[in-house]
Image (tube, helix red, strand yellow):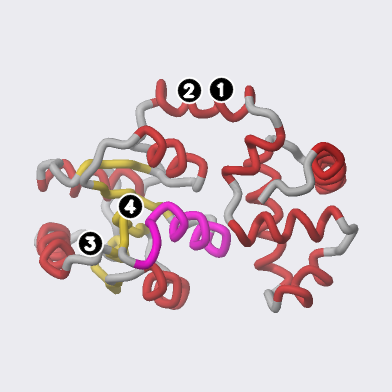
Amino acid sequence: MAQHDSPIRVFLMDDHEVVRRGLKDLLEIEGEFEVVGEAATAAQALARVPALKPQVAVLDVRLPDGDGVTVCRELRSQMPELACLMLTSFSDDEALFDSIMAGASGYLLKQVGGMDLVGAVRTVAAGGSLIDPKLTAAVMARLRAGEPKDRLSALSAQERRILDLIGEGLTNRQIGERLFLAEKTVKNYVSSLLSKLGIERRVQAAVMVSEIKSTSHSYG
């Protein structure tokens, strides 16, 4: 294993302070990790992570003001290089599916042993995955088999708004002006939603929007 010249930068999001403190102690005692920030809520994480630029974000799946899956999706739309490791108290197939669709690198139950968790952070920091390949294959098969309307369930609310504006023929710059987003942020959102919809070009997305609207008054 290659030695890191500088510690792996980690961000922790969990609504329980004792959990965050335990995770911080577990990681920092190893000497190869630095916990650069913490959050108790989704809003705090979304505000703090981009400025702190961690390599790994350890995210609780269930939060008082939202969920870790949405946080993962939003952060990775801004920071594609960020590795997200989902932590949950519950074994939930739907949450696993949503986590994979959001681009998470790993999914662990909180009952995992301390050294296993440290190893998981090390693995995702190195670009590895901690989701069973069989589960990943099943998720991708489910996505490919779905009708376009079903695929939309993988999109965040912001991605759906952007998809609508693509359907209106707006450019990334125009979408940014409409939604008060930087053009680069819009570009990242577009790349993410095209990937989730299983298509390569925005013109295909525009066609998909028109097809869906011709068969349904609403797909929200």
* Neighbour tally class for label 4: few under 14, some 14-19, many 20 plus, Cα within 10 Å: many
User: Circle 2 sits in a helix, a strand or a loop, which is it?
Assistant: helix
Sequence order check, earlier mark of 2 and 3:
3
Give the residue number, with chain letter if any, for mark 3: 33
Q: Is residue 159 above or below residue 92?
A: below
Residue 10, percent from left and from top: 30, 63
Name the secondary structure under disc 1. Answer: helix
As rendered, which of 56 and 4 lies closer to the eye?
A: 56
Where residue 115 sits: x, y (%)?
12, 45
- Which kind of residue does numbered mark 2 sit on? Ala
Per the picture, the main secondary structure of the magenta-coloured stretch is: helix
The residue at which mark 1 appears reads as 141
* Cα separation between marks 4 and 2: 21 Å
- Would you identify the image quadrant in which residue 16 lies? bottom left
Residue identifier under label 4: 61
Residue contact at pointers 1 and 2, CB within 8 angstroms: yes
Q: Nearer the viewer, mark 3 or mark 1?
A: 1
Give the distance between the C-alpha atoms of the residues marked 4 and 1, in whole angstroms.
24 Å
Residue 26 appears anywhere in the view: yes
Q: Which residues are magenta?
A: 65-79
